[in-house]
Image (cartoon, coloured by chain):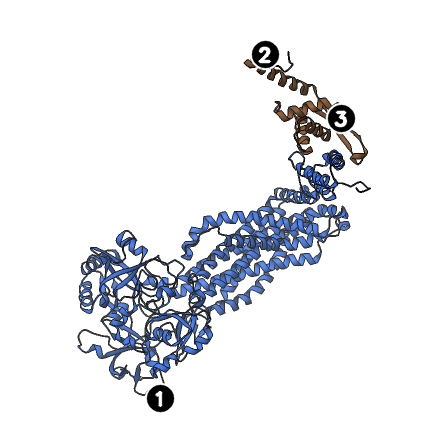
Amino acid sequence: MKETRLGEFEEVILLLVGILGEEAYAFKIAEEFESQTNRSVSIGAVHSTLNRLEDKGFLTSEMGKSSAERGGRRKRIYTITASGERALEASRDFKLSLWRQYPAFATGKLDFGLK
Amino acid sequence: MNDHKPIPPKLAERFLLWFIRNDLAEEVLGDLDEKFYQTFEKKSAYRARLNYWYQVISYLRPFAIRKSRSINSNYIFMIRHNFLITFRGFKRYKASFFINMIGLSTGLVCALLIYLWVNDELTVDKFHEKDDRLYQVMQNFESSFGINTIEWTPAPLAKTLMDEMPEVEYAVPVYPPASYTFNSVVAIDNKRLKARAKYAGKDYFNVFSYRLIHGDRDQVLHDKNSVVISDELALNLFRTTENIVGKTITWEQGEFAGDYAISGVFEKIPANSSIQFDMVFNYELYTSKHLELQNWSYNDPCTYIILRDDARAEVLSNKVADLTKTHDPNAEGSLFLRKYSDQHLYGNYENGVNTGGRIAYVILFSVIAIFILLIACINFMNLSTARASRRFKEIGIKKSIGAKRSTLAVQYLGESLIMAFLSLIAALLIVQFLLPQFNQITGKQLALGLDSSLLLSLCCITLVTGLLAGSYPALHLSGFHPIKILKGNASTSSASLWVRKGLVVFQFTASVILIILVLVVSNQMAFIQSKNLGYEKDNVVYFNADSWNSGELETFLNEVSTVRGVINASAMKGNLTVNDHNSTAGITWEGQLAGEEVKFTDLVVDFDFFETMGIEVASGRTFSRNFSTEDSKIIFNEAAVKSMGLIDPVGQSVKLWGRERQIIGVVKDFHFESLYESVKPCFFRLGDKSMNILIKIKAGTAIETIAEIQDLYQKKSQGMALDYQFLDEAFQRLYASEQRVSILSRYFAGIAIIISCLGLFGLAAFTAERRLKEIGVRKVMGAGELSIITLLSNDFTKIVFIAISIALPVAYLLAKNWLEAFAHRIDLEWWFFIGAGALALIIAWLTVSIQTIKAARLNPVICLKDE
């Protein structure tokens, strides 16, 4: 049985795949990651994570269209699977339940816009 | 900015393609291109290129790297395929596999054991740091018997060399010479132990690199009253090697008896030193008691020197040649240098010329090892080529789909290398198992220590064996024409048949030669053992009594002769089983021609010597206690009388070293030296110092008589245990190395025969299998079993006959050559040769018959039903 929990980086990548939809391929995801987090990342690192997530069954992929700036090469488009979505939900729920037990949050001093 | 767009760095791209998984290449290259152009637009071409490299390197992750990183996976695949084919072949043809395996590993076992032995022999005495500059001064004496070469040198030689020869860095005299030692008792408080001593010049430890644990190598031998002892002796005396420098021990050797202070401790002499001793005294201590050793005409000590770095041994050797004559006009010897480490392997001199020595055995065994390995390799070649027909289809198909000849050759060589390495593993296990027995036979302490040099040699031996064994099959099998063999009309060419037969002939020739040599060697050894020596060596006990004075000796001999079971007791200087008797030309006789000179061996004996040893008297009488002036009498052996040309010698007088002595008797010749030598002239005189006691005891009473002698001895020597030996056993030890060679060669010849037979067995099996149809047809037509057996055996009989006819003359020459070293030798009997030939033939027949009988008894229906 493969490890099915999500790491922090994995979770972000998984979310980005969902956000980018049709445009979710390694280079774009790395771009998006950099612009959203201001952290630099290599395409290789992203690709490796995508590969791992695919192994875990959270992603599927298929070869997409080619374009000129890619030298006519096709790209691999990733899509979230049902179990990928479940893993994201579980991760979010788990964190929310933790947040709810956090006293400062419970008394309303902190507000993340989540009700 | 440039007009045309830059492109991603080609090198990085190629690098990426080299390592990345094929299925990822397209998408990754695409992503990296996009990244490259984006960076280029945002930043610069340079940054883009740099980033491209960074991205490529960041793809060096396990998930992206292709599993097998070889450029040409076909190559790997072929190697894997070859392995597979090899192991399938082993599994399928188990009989040939085991024949090859047994043959090769037996061959390797022999080669390994011999390698260990030879290696050990070659390192004897080589461990001295200055080995390349360590020389020994030797001396040649001319006499009517030719040139006699001895190790003893004039006593003042070492000092003179130091003083007069600038080439000499160190020179030390050592007494007693060569490997002899003074054996006596060393004592502290009430502990008494036997020890072996040398007397050596003060630079002894500078010349020889025996390791000093305590003491300074320049200082330890400076004082006449000090002694250096081995750590082994120290442990036995003091139970420690620490803090014993300065302690006093008592040494009880005759004139040197006294107390000595320990000035140093050396590490036990290593086993591969030809000289063994427990303690070293100062040489001047010895000369102080032997003032005659200031004189150039006395040849007593050995002289060892260290040359200076820039000095040449040959030059110095010429320079010292006449050194004795310049100091003593009467001296006859001429000096020369010999490398010290050569003494072990090149110790024999004949008429002034080095005739080798143990090196002969080293070469002999190396040759045997090579022969046995060769025989084993030939088995492999023979069986592989013979089995070629089984592989016709494989070869044909491989060749027609494009295998090159070299590819096939590599395959077969690989096969034989795998075989060789498997055999090596088996051989190592067997050697480990056999080593104790082998050590017992060789009298060595060999061990299979896996050091780098051994490993290297092992790999070399195995590699050579594998390549040699595989060479012929590789060349032969890979040369087949694919069309012919696939059509099925490729019969083995007559040339290859010839080679195969030739190889078997070679194997059997080698085996027959070995059998004959073994017969000759063991017969010669038996001959020596049973040879009438001219004295009776059985039931004689002897032991050393160097430390006794003449009075003590006399009373002991008197007491011992009263012991029941003692027939006679006497004493002599030296020993009949060791060639260390002095010889002299100092005898003049009446009728001696001017310039005529005979070298006589000087044997110093006590009363009753001839009676004790059972030496026959030819005329006259022996020394007797009934006469008071026996000190001025002399006895000769027949050889001496003959060489002096005396007629009716008893009663005549000769002059020994200027003093008149009357001849009272002549004894028959007996062997007082090794049987390599003929009996030389010798004379006997009475003496009373430094004797070995000889006691003849009644046969069958050895145990109780020796017990009584032991009691007597212990009383005399304050509780020392008697260290006695039987003369016949000592005599056997004298020929120990011949004995060992004889035993070893018997084993090796046996092994050679076994390996040859394995080959023959395999070949016979193959022939029988190939001619199965023919046999079937013949049987259907009415041939009897016997006629089929003869049919199949005929081929092999012919081969073995050819081998025998080649082997006999070669063996004859070799045996004759070997026997020539002995003065007393057996004749080469015809039955050695016929016997060995017949033996080889019978063994060959037996081997082949197992297969032929099986084939002849086969039901023809079984072998013919296929067609």
Kindly identify which numbered label has been placed on residue A108.
2
* Marks 3 & 2, CB-CB < 8 Å contact: no
Residue picked out by circle 1 = B594
Q: The residue tagged with tag 3: helix, strand or loop? A: helix
Classify 10 Å Cα crowding around label 3: few (below 14), some (14-19), many (20 and above): some
| Nearest the eye: B184 or B286 | B286
Q: Chain of mark 1?
A: B
Instruction: Give the CA separation, mark 1 to mark 2.
Output: 140 Å
Q: Is residue B694 visible?
A: no
Position above or below: B778 against B352: above
At label 2, the amino acid type is Gly
Q: At which x and y percent is residue B826?
A: 44, 68
Q: Quadrant of the C terminus of chain B?
A: top right
Q: The residue tagged with tag 1: helix, strand or loop? A: loop
Q: Is residue B821 left or right of residue B42?
A: left
Q: Quadrant of the N terminus of chain B?
A: top right
Position above or below: B519 against B93: below
Q: At which x and y percent is residue B59?
A: 67, 36
The residue shown at (31%, 76%) is B298
Kindly identify which numbered label has been placed on residue A23.
3
Q: Nearer the viewer, mark 3 or mark 2?
A: 2
Quadrant position of residue B796: bottom right
Q: Are marks 3 and 1 on the same chain?
A: no
| Nearest the eye: B446 or B817 | B446
Q: Are marks 1 and 2 on the same chain?
A: no
